[in-house]
Each structure stands twice: as C-alpha cells, then as structure tokens.
Amino acid sequence: MNRHRKKAEKEKREKKHKARVPREVKDDGEEDERKYRVLGKTWDQKVKTLRSVFSFVVLEGKFFATLDKAPHTASFDTCLVASAQVPIHIKPIGCRYYWATACLAGYKAKDKTRAEVRTEEKIGKRRWEQVVKLGGDGSKTLKRGEYERHLDDFGVNIGVYSPEIRRAIRGVVGQKTLYPLAHIDVQSIPVLFHPDGRKDVLFEIKFDCGKGKTFDGFTTDIVEIEIEVKNFPKDMPDSKIEALLDLAEKMLFRDYGDNLEPIFESKPAVLFRHLVSWRDRNETEFTAAFRSLRGDKWKVWERPAPKA
C-alpha cells in the first residue's frame, strides 16, 4: 500500500511541476527556497548578524554538512580533507536591473502570479544574464519557475524564449514595453551543503548583502539569507523536502531567531511596493516619469521640486 501511495504522490508532483513550469532547456526549472530578512536598526547591525550566521553555518558541520566535510568527503584522501576549506564562491559585487511595464503588472499585491524580470552583467564573461521568475508569493516555501538566458548587451529580450514561455511571461507582465525601474547592488555568498548529512540531497544557503534603489531615488537595504533546494532523488516526496527545510530553519532560529524574519517574496518586492504606491497616489506623475525612461540604459528620474 505504501508503494502505491508513493507512486501516486510522485505522479501528482510531476504533473503539478509540468503544469506550472514550461521547460525548454536544461537550465529551466522550478526554484524552491526559503527566505529570511536579517533584522537590525542599522546597516552595520544587519551585516554583523549576517556574518555571524555565515560563520555558524560553515563551522557547525553536522546539519550543515558542507562539501569539505562528511559525507561528501568520505572517499577523499584524509590529508586533503584535513586541509580543505569550506566550498564557497564569493561573488563580486554586481548590479541587477529589474524590469516592468508602466502598469507594474506582476508586481502588485493583487496579482495571482508574481513576476521577476532581471538582467545582470556577468563580470569576466563578456555577456549579460537575463532571468525571469514566475510564481505566487505567500507560501512558506517560495516556488517559482525560473528561465535563464544569455544576452549580448544591456537590455531585456523576451523574444529569446520559446513561444510557450513567452506566452507565460507576457501573461503575467503584459504586452507593453519593459523598462528598468529598479536595481540592486548586491554581493552573494553561496554555500552548498547536505542537509542533516544526507548525501543524496543538496541545498544551497546564500548570504546576500546589498542596496536597492528605484528610478525615483527610493532606497532600501537588502540583507537576506536564502535556502534553496538544488538536488534530491526523484522519488523523494515533497513532505520530506519540506521537513529538511523546516530543520534548517529551526537550526538558524535556535540562536538567531530574534534577528531573522521569514519572508515570502522576491528581493525587489519592497522596491516595487514603493512604485505601486506612487502610481496609486499619482498615476499622472508616475506615467510621466516612466515615459522619460529609455530601455537602453539606466536613468534616475528626478522628481520636480514642489511648488511654493
């Protein structure tokens, strides 16, 4: 009976996955992650907490079994393992541009499906990366379809996707021209680990530190921790993945619960809430500002001085 239940659960999961996420290349797929905002009154407090959590994760060694520890290193030379360093890839500070239409479709609280359309220059690779994420906010684990393509220059190009994926994207963001309305300067430190020492499951915990800005000058701190599911057995039920994510969250909150807040939205959500609020208050002003932008470069629009 358990075998039939597992088979039914697997078929249900695969059917749900195929229905939600159009796929055309290897990099397309579903992104499952938990996100936590680092709290603090000042930038320095937030960064200090982020670094403290990072140190805890790379030194803990049991639940956060990073790839310089067992079980991953069980078959490697013991001298090499003893001198190995935690596998991290500290990325250079980069700038991500976030694109939307004048009506901000896909970024409003009432939208059933949320969008994230971003581009980022890949330093040293002489190209730009375009990433589109589609999915609903609000669940404990953020689940989104993710579509990544390479571009030759600054800009956005939905045409690089297949007709199926283009329809999915345009069904959320609309048919009008996309412009870069916000950007985030960010550095990310990802660390891979086997949760609870399970060699057949791989998670990634990322420590993100950045500053966000909209084209009218609104700014906010972006200091977050993300735990993303990277790999797991095909026959592993969702409930077990969620249980491992719950354990990871419990480990973080055991010592840092007062400094972390679970969030259920993408990084630019705060920036676009500001823009949506501005548009709701004064659509004429927002529209005039939007029309002053150009799609081939980043431009900060300056608000006119208030009348005396």
Image (tube, rainbow, N blue to C red):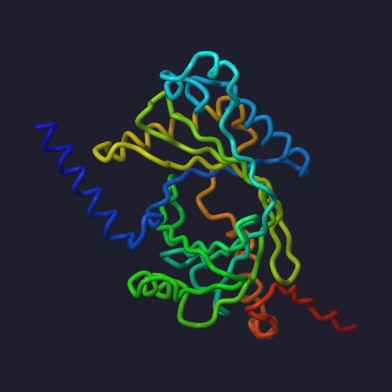
Q: Nearer the viewer, residue 243 or 30?
A: 30
Relative horizontal placement of residue 263, taking residue 7 as reference (left or right):
right
- Which of the 4 image quarters holds residue 36? top right
Q: Is residue 231 above or below residue 250?
A: below
Observer-nearest of 20 and 286: 20
Q: Quadrant of the N terminus?
A: top left
Question: Which corner quadrant holds the C terminus?
Answer: bottom right
Percent x, y for residue 302? 79, 76
**Whole-percent x and y of residue 208?**
63, 45
Residue beneath the point at 68% across and 48% down: 92
Q: Which residue shows up at 73% across the image and 71% down it?
A: 216
Q: 177 or 147, which lies in front?
A: 147
Which residue is most to the top?
78
Quarter of the rendering containing residue 37: top right
Q: Is residue 1 left or right of residue 151?
A: left
Q: Quadrant of residue 87?
A: top right
Whether residue 231 is situated above or below residue 145 in the rendered picture? above
Q: How many marks?
A: 0
Q: What residue sits 55% from the left and 14% below the top?
A: 79
Q: Residue at x 65, y 56 (%)?
A: 123
Q: Is residue 188 above or below residue 27?
A: above
Residue 139 in the image, given as x and y percentages of width and height? 42, 49
Image position of 270 (left or right of 26): right
Q: Nearer the viewer, residue 84 or 212?
A: 84
Q: Position of residue 210 (x, y in %)?
A: 69, 50
Task: Tell me: 120 left or right of 213.
Answer: left
